[in-house]
Image (spheres, rainbow, N blue to C red):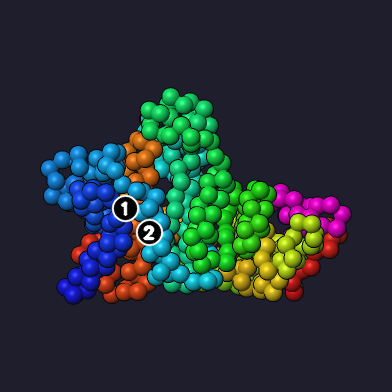
Amino acid sequence: MDEDLAAWVAGLDDLFGRVAGRFYRAEPRLRARAYVRGLLAPLAGKNGWTLAEAAGDGTPHGMQRLLNRAAWDVGGVRDDVRAYAVEHLGDRDGVLVVDETGFLKKGVKSVGVQRQYSGTAGRIENCQLGVFCAYTTGKGRTLIDGELYLPKSWTEDRQRCRTAGVPDEVEFATKATLAKQMLARALDAGVPARWVTADEAYGGDSKFRSWLENRRIGYVVAVPCSQAIPVTAGSTRADYLVAQAPSQAWKRRSCGEGAKGPRLFDWAVATLPTYHDTTAPGWIRWVLARRALTPNTKGELEIAYHLCCAPTGTTDDELIRVAGARWAVEDCFQTAKTEVGLDQYQVRRYDAWYRHVTLAMLAHTYLAVTAAISPKVLAAASSHSHSVKSDVFWHT
């Protein structure tokens, strides 16, 4: 057991050796290492005080300086962590997943905070929203990038932004725009991935889908039931189209393993018309429907709708696999928050948010890689810590 724990520490030292050059002085480099070890420790809460105590400091000033004033390259650390994830988890069939998560806050001074819908809370709350990119393969999953969403209530008040440390050049960007920025960084860096998946907040954006097609990366994205689907005579709603699927089009398939075993649903896939002026040569679009096996409280079988685009020859099972990969980001949010304190920061400034989030992603990625390559080492460490007529073609 002690040997396994020593290997866990050595692995963390190796990861920090990769990012050491991003810190320009020894003090912030050592402080960042202590910060990450605190995030990985079994602390009841992971804020400036508890992380300082775990590091043997009498006050949180050093940790606060690391996040607010010390000079280091946060973007470079992010890139190094992404490369580390690819080295150990990379696979050519990898999936990039974009989604947002909420950080509940009090008051009005934390950068980006306002009353807005948080999927984490399931209601409108006073919160910040972070848009993240996860990378998932058969080897593991982790968060590789994150951006803070700034509502217009912030970007239209430049003095408020300056007080919170937001650079003047940072303008309003939609969540889909932030997602595209992160995906571009991943693809430009050569992250091996053939797919992107996202929920309907992103999939329902035609500009987002067009951007993915222009980048020649396949996608399976959720869309609302009212999504317009092109057919022979114009277009129709997704739910109207799927309602016409013949019974033999529905097939029971698992879209991956869940906490209680295979995630089984009934699925139907239809090939959509090809328009040569918009569809890349050799690529096809589909509509994919996922139907629950048991009724909801209203006695209805809930159906989720997806639009897909990928090279000719892509199988139905592959589309279903990618649709199921979207849950990976939810797992990442849960483990990053409960295991490494992604949401337990006490910072208000723009740059400090990115610094904490980047160090939390480093810690989370280390856990993901360790679980993939040395599960016994991780276990040892954990023991020491804690009706429409159309020309779509249904696949039967």
Amino acid type of the residue that numbered disc 2 sits on in the rendered structure: Asp
Q: How many marks?
A: 2
Residue 361: quarter of image = bottom left
Mark 2 and mark 1 lie on one chain; the one further toward the N terminus is 1
Q: Report, in whole angstroms, how far the alpha carbon at label 2 lies from the one at label 1.
A: 9 Å
Name the residue carrying label 2. 80
Q: Secondary structure at mark 1?
A: helix
Residue 161 appears at what percent x and percent y?
43, 30
Q: Is residue 245 above or below residue 38?
A: below
Residue 118 appears at what percent x and percent y?
48, 43
Residue 219: quarter of image = bottom right
Amino acid type of the residue that numbered disc 1 sits on in the rendered structure: Arg
Of residues 148 and 304, the one nearer the viewer is 148
Residues at discs 2 and 1 in contact (Cβ within 8 Å) = yes
Q: Secondary structure at mark 2?
A: helix
Q: Which residue appears at 41% of the width and 69% of the height?
A: 87
Left or right of 289 in this view: 192: left
Of residues 166 and 370, the one nearer the viewer is 166
- Is residue 194 in view? yes
Q: Which residues are magenta?
A: 223-243
Residue 64: quarter of image = top left
In this rendering, the label closer to the viewer, 2 or 1: 1
Q: Is residue 174 above or below residue 290?
A: above
Q: Is residue 17 above or below residue 62?
A: below
Q: Which residue appears at 44% of the width and 53% of the height?
A: 145
Image quadrant for the N terminus? bottom left
Q: Which residue appears at 49% of the width and 64% of the height?
A: 191
Left or right of 296 in this view: 335: left
Residue 224 appears at what percent x and percent y?
66, 50
Name the residue carrying label 1. 22
Q: Is residue 283 above or below residue 1?
A: above
